[in-house]
């Protein structure tokens, strides 16, 4: 077990190093001029030379790379070319909003996807199966950004039930004290008893997390279905039935429990994919997270920001991957 | 002798293909998706000639016609410049399918030989190539594609390039797994014993035997590639105005769609339907080609 985790950790570091190399190489082939972006268009030659030195661009490539890795190891992701602020601290400010959104989306997609997959497997090749399969394949076929816009059109513009974007309504922001304990708005407002804020934040979360979670619903339902299909005819299931246990208990307790391995992997990995999808969705809902941050950076070619968010997302994906492997490895049936 | 042997092999392969196609065709959803794909390919080919308003494709602005609801004149309504959305969506089929074909083809061209070399050569070559693919496969391809496209600069060509760079490792991994098992087979050993050069052994004897699973994977990938290219265009990293690319059209519609539902609905439906049929076809293919799932 320890050897396995160590090996996976080492591979994780190799992967991260690879990501850093790729993004670093890419920043050196870009057609834009970071110096001009840093000092503005009307800077003098002297200012430009100064900026070149400040940004470390006058050094040879391998020195630049070494310096970048050294800074990364100290949690320094460089400075945004647009705002001149530290990328790491700007990301840290936005991270709680994104994490909150991603977790709620994943929770929602598991709560919908799991039962969908179980029902589909139980009623294989009959209409509940067909409906649920078409539903889940549609979920993975829809562009996330389109779902987001369509939800806005439906629930904001036509029905008027939910807000179009942002994390809080203006009047709530103006007339209520916004608690700041951990940075996670839902958690903070619930803990400090600010239920008006909590309710408002929850309402703002619904549409973005639905848009983000749709893909996960499809993935989880498909994986649960195929895992359940393999299990339904196992001997222990027949044994459970022959004890006279109700079918409900057999499939939802015994069956689901035994199919959780592959499903857990999918859920864990879909957190990583959902994180990347926030790049597409947050801007639509003006959500103050890192997805919105990088979507803006992409249009202005703010490359320290793009690099920072890319490396962060890759790192979280590697960590999630590791967690998924460890969860599976704790299953006593798995031999490493 | 040689001729008879290959004719026999060809006949058997044709029979196998017909059996598989028969099994595939029995699945109703697969049959529907095959028809839709054929129709879309046909539309993509003839789009410039059958578009009801050809001038809308590249964008001749007509402010008097802007943001009109769907009607018998403009089936899908018009956009903010008065262009016919139906004509643009129709022409977009050509761009999306073309981008997907190009991406998958280039990824195959890069990934397949690398996988064959890694599998057949083994040793340090294998290690180096496979560790590189491990790096690429360890995080979401959309993330890599976004980063690459951002750095290369926004254009459809660069978006396709970004997709290729993040897609080829999948094919390398599949081919390598196949090649490792095939290189120990008798006919490869025989070829090697007869002194066939390594390059001929790899590309003439091993590679043709590995292509089956890769073709399945490639057909499955069309849907994801279309989604990724659309996502890149939506972020402003892919096709540029006035190209009638579906993702770009949805991006432009963001400022108008609350008062013009048709503007976002139809380009989006075009993406959904196209990706859906490729996914259904892929599911069907897997069921037919995976012996465990096969039902006679």
Image: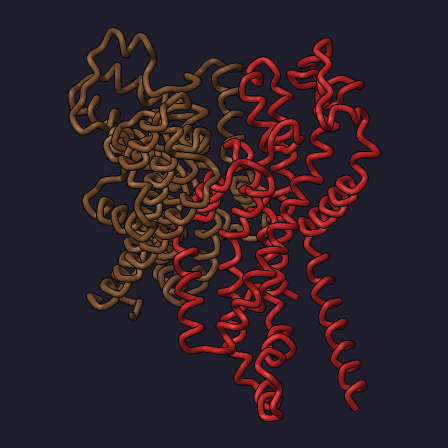
Using the rendered view, name the quadrant where residue A175 is placed: top left
Name the outermost residue toward the right: B49
Q: Which chain is brown?
A: A
Indicate whether A41 appears above or below A159: below
Q: Quadrant of the C terminus of chain A?
A: bottom left
Does B57 sit left or right of B116 as displayed?
right
Above or below for B75 versus B206: above
> Residue B43, position in %: x, y?
77, 39
Residue B129 in view here: yes
Point out residue B282 in the picture as x, y percentages from the top left corner. Answer: 61, 54
Residue located at (80% from left, 18% from top):
B73
Quadrant position of residue B268: top right
Q: Quadrant of residue A103?
A: top left
Q: Say whether residue A248 is visible.
A: no
**Above or below — where is B17 with respect to A318?**
below
| Colour of chain B in the image | red
The residue closer to the viewer here, A263 or A209, is A209
Provide residue A51's location: percent of width, then percent of height: 31, 32
């Amino acid at each position: 077990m320890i050897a396995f985790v160590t090996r996976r950790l080492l591979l994780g570091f190799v992967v991260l190093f690879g990501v850093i190399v790729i993004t670093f190489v890419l920043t050196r082939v870009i057609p834009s001029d970071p110096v001009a972006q840093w000092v503005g268009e009307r800077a003098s030659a002297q200012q430009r030379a100064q900026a070149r030195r400040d940004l470390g661009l006058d050094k040879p490539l391998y020195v630049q790379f070494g310096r970048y890795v050294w800074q990364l190891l100290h949690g320094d992701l460089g400075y945004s070319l647009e705002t001149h602020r530290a990328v790491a601290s700007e990301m840290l400010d936005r991270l709680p909003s994104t994490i909150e959104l991603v977790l709620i989306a994943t929770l929602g997609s598991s709560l919908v996807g799991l039962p969908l997959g179980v029902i589909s497997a139980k009623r294989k090749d009959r209409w509940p199966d067909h409906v649920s399969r078409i539903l889940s394949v549609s979920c993975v076929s829809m562009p996330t950004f389109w779902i987001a816009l369509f939800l806005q059109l439906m629930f904001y513009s036509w029905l008027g039930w939910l807000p179009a974007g942002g994390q809080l309504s203006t009047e709530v922001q103006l007339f209520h004290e916004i608690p700041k304990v951990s940075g996670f708005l839902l958690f903070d407002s619930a803990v400090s008893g600010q239920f008006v804020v909590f309710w408002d934040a929850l309402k703002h979360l619904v549409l973005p997390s639905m848009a983000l979670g749709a893909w996960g619903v499809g993935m989880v339902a498909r994986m649960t279905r195929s895992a359940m299909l393999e299990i339904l005819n196992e001997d222990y299931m027949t044994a459970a039935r022959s004890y006279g246990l109700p079918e409900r208990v057999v499939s939802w307790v015994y069956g689901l429990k035994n199919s959780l391995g592959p499903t857990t992997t999918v859920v864990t990995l879909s957190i990583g994919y959902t994180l990347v999808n926030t790049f597409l969705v947050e801007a639509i809902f003006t959500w103050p997270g890192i997805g919105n941050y990088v979507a803006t950076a992409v249009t202005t070619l703010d490359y320290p920001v793009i690099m920072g968010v890319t490396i962060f997302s890759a790192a979280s994906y590697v960590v999630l991957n590791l967690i998924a492997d460890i969860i599976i490895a704790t299953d006593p049936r798995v031999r490493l | 002798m040689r001729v008879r042997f290959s004719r026999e092999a060809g006949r058997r392969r044709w029979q196998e293909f017909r059996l598989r196609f028969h099994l595939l065709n029995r699945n109703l959803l697969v049959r529907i998706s095959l028809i839709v794909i054929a129709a879309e390919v046909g539309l993509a080919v003839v789009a410039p000639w059958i578009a009801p308003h050809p001038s809308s494709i590249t964008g001749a602005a007509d402010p008097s016609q802007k943001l009109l609801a769907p009607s018998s004149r403009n089936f899908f309504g018009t956009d903010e410049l008065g262009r016919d959305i139906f004509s643009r969506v129709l022409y977009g089929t050509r761009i999306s399918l073309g981008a997907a074909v190009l991406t998958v083809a280039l990824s195959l061209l890069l990934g397949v030989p690398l996988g064959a070399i890694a599998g057949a050569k083994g040793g340090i070559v294998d290690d180096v190539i496979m560790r590189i693919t491990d790096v690429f496969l360890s995080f979401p391809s959309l993330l890599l594609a976004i980063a690459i496209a951002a750095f290369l600069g926004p254009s459809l060509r660069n978006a396709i390039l970004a997709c290729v760079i993040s897609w080829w490792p999948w094919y390398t991994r599949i081919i390598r797994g196949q090649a490792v098992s095939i290189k120990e087979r008798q006919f490869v050993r025989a070829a090697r014993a007869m002194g066939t050069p390594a390059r001929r052994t790899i590309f003439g004897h091993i590679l043709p035997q590995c292509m089956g699973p890769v073709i399945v994977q490639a057909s499955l990938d069309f849907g994801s590639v279309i989604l990724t290219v659309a996502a890149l265009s939506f972020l402003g990293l892919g096709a540029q105005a006035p190209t009638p690319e579906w993702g770009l059209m949805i991006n432009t519609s963001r400022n108008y769609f609350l008062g013009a539902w048709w503007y976002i609905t139809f380009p989006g439906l075009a993406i959904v339907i196209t990706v859906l049929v490729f996914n259904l076809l892929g599911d069907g293919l897997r069921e037919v080609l995976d012996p465990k799932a096969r039902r006679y």
